[in-house]
Image (cartoon, grey):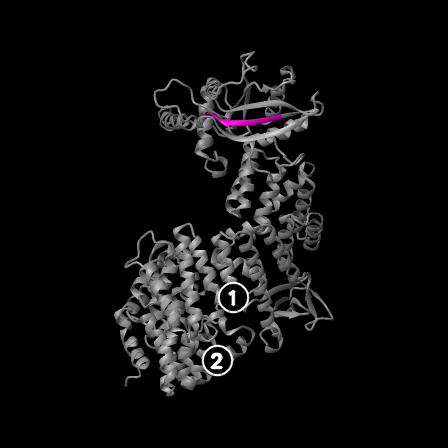
Amino acid sequence: EEVAGLVELALAKNRDDRFATAAEFAEALALQGAGPLTPTRTQPVRVRRRMRVPRWAAIAVVAPLLLAAVWVGGAKIGIGSTRPPLDSLRYLVLPFEYGDGVAPSLGVDGLLQDALRQWMGITVMGRPEAGLGANPLAPEDARDAAAAQHAGQYVRGDVSRVGDSLRLHVTVHDATADGAPVREGSVTLAPTLAGAGPRFTRLADQLLFDDTLGAGPGAVGTRSFPARRAYARGLAAVQEWNLGAADSAFVAATQYDPNYAQAHLWLAQVRFWGDGLPAIWRSSAERAAGGRERLSSGDAHLSEALLAFGRGEVPRACAVWNRLTQREPYAFPGWYGLANCLSRDDAVLRDRGSPSGWSFRSSYYRATKAYQRAFELQPMILRGLSGGAYASVRRQLRTGGNEVRFGRAVAPDTSRFSAHPAWRDDTLAFVPYPRFQFTKPEVVPDQWRLAVRRQRELFHDIATAWATALPESPDANEALAISLELLENPAAIDAIHRARALANTDAQRVRLAAAEVWMRVKFSVPSDPQGLTLARSLADSLLPSAPAADATEPLLLASLAALTGRAQLATGFSRLPHAAREWGVPPPLARNALPLLIFAAFGGPPDSLRVLEHEVDAAIDQRFLVSVRQEARMSWLVRPGRLAFPDHPFQSIPKLVGTGDYLIDAEAALQRGDTAMVRRVFADLRDARQSAPLSEVNLEGLYPEARLLTALEGPRAGITWLDGTLGALAATDPESFVNPANAAALVRAMALRADLADQVNDRPAARRWAGMVMVLWSDSDVFLQPTVRRMRRFATGAT
């Protein structure tokens, strides 16, 4: 019956109800041969609905796992061995060695046994033989003694006199690994052992667990060994900023011990840090608060702040976090909690002193400074925040030129607000305006460019601190390179090159090398062909002749293939399943949506565009619900349709007109001769872009916009439109070129710039831009060779 209960637990439908690992299941099964049921979990195995397990099924399931238990429990136990498996949850405390002047009758080893036995889920035994403490056991004898008791761990200690005190030093050894020491601890005791209880309790903690965070006196919160071990895994994951692993570990800890207040607190905290909605973590915060008397003072404050935020009492929550930063100025959780609280407070209040009559309740500037302090205290966080070229950090610090802060009026008012960044009185400021006023040019502050610059400098300060604290970290050096790139400093190339030299995984090497390619491109266009040649050479070294199914970073490789004119190779990478998943392509379009977008960005080949457009359009009609078809077309037909026009107008354009895309509507208007509408579109675009730097313009949109404007107003208008963004390429966001369509559209925009220069007889400009295209596309696919030959004529001055 006990084995059936364990099997049912292992086969539970809910993952969180099962054993955390196969090793834990094996340990629990192995214990059945050593005595009564001792499940790994602290709670008894309660079978709510008895599963009738046929004997043949029980044998089929349990037998191989029992065999696994033999191998897991003792490295030396083989098939056919008569020695029982060693249990890693059984501890044998061997008689301690006593130095001169210390009486063995003190029984120090027995006191440690009592302290270890406070932990549920492990078995603690003493050496049954008497009279063996006078002479130290040889290592092999100690291992044999542990094996005789089926113990996977054994404890050795020595007691010596130091002045007027006793010093106890203890080591835990792993019996399954030839007695290798795994943990040790020391404690000073009074000769009479008066008041030794708490000291032995702390020593037992040191011997059983590796972590230190949250394990201070009075803050352990549980006596369940598996719960405490899961909690330790969670804390270690937090140190590495692996919030997903931390979440899983804290969930396991709360399952082993439902009253474990610390585990509930940290579960709520990591979910709050991960931008989880309060509904996801509020229950954990409430349960942590219910065990407040078992929390340390700092954890109690964290619990209070989380609980207030979860209940919607944001000002009170921010105030508690602020007090915690004052009480514990070197503790990361308080600063990071305060930063998140302030940055997520979107409440807007009436303010007669504000230009708009409104102001945000919380200061975002204070939030960015709190983020800075948190990152200084926990530099290891950068490992978990490095995705998308540190996009989450840059978003938190508001380093983007298109940054907008959104807000809402306090109930019962239902107004919604938006605000551009500004720099006032040496402070980042956001002045909220009602949404209906936000599109007006007069609401754009004069200092928004300075605000963006200051926030990028703040990111550079943080990255510099990371790189100083962790000089051999590729992540820290990457962050430094990105911060320099945002400041348009070519020293970014040296920093990313150093990060590449420190990279320790294939994926990291590819990602950092691709980043260097794009940095070199951005700092070379439009006047450094030698730098562009180095970028092209590095891109060539990364690209295989054909995409492999297990290709690392397929979208990055596709972007490099697009940059160098290898359209077929780029679309091959885009067809890999993990590329489609990364871009969120729906399964019915996984094989053709990205290839259509990439070919459209290249402007061909025409036959491929026609076939792929038909396949995508048909798949949307046949395999999507009517309610989502228009959304699917906006996502997977509008973007390629923009880029293919006017050379290859899509047959599906009539389905897309009037659905809200300004470029599709303008292209259709131009086709029917409605130039007035096209002019209105560009007037609106010019107004909208007064509030954002030209470097923020998406290259995927820049090229078709320039084609339209040239058709409407002539080549000089197209030149002006292109030059603003091409000239600001160095300031483009680092993640822009993960999009292969942007890469192809960039080179096409450069070729268009050369064509327009030729049309206005600007030979030097035509030569310069054509030379850039030649460097990148000299051996491009066949359908691009007419463009290459035309660029060659411009570059050489041939007629």
Q: Amino acid at mark 2?
A: Phe
Please identify the quarter of the rendering in which residue 7 is found: top left
Along the line of sight, the residue nearer the viewer: 427 or 97: 97
Mark 1 and mark 2: Cα distance apart in space = 28 Å
Q: Amino acid at mark 1?
A: Leu
The residue lying furthest to the bottom in this view is 761
Percent position of residue 581, x then y: 40, 55
- The residue indicated by pointer 2 is 682
The residue carrying mark 1 is 486
Q: Main secondary structure of the magenta part?
A: strand
Q: In the image shown, does 423 or 589 lie closer to the viewer?
A: 423
**Residue depicted at 34% across the width and 70% down the height:** 776
Residue 427: give x, y in percent of width and height: 66, 66
* Image side of residue 547 versus residue 53, left or right: left
Label 2 sits on a secondary structure element that is helix
The stretch drawn in magenta includes residue 731: no
Query: Where does the magenta region start and end?
Result: 168-175
Q: Is residue 326 visible?
A: yes
**In the image, residue 440 lies at what x, y percent?**
59, 76
The residue lying furthest to the right in this view is: 352
- Which numbered marker is on residue 141? none
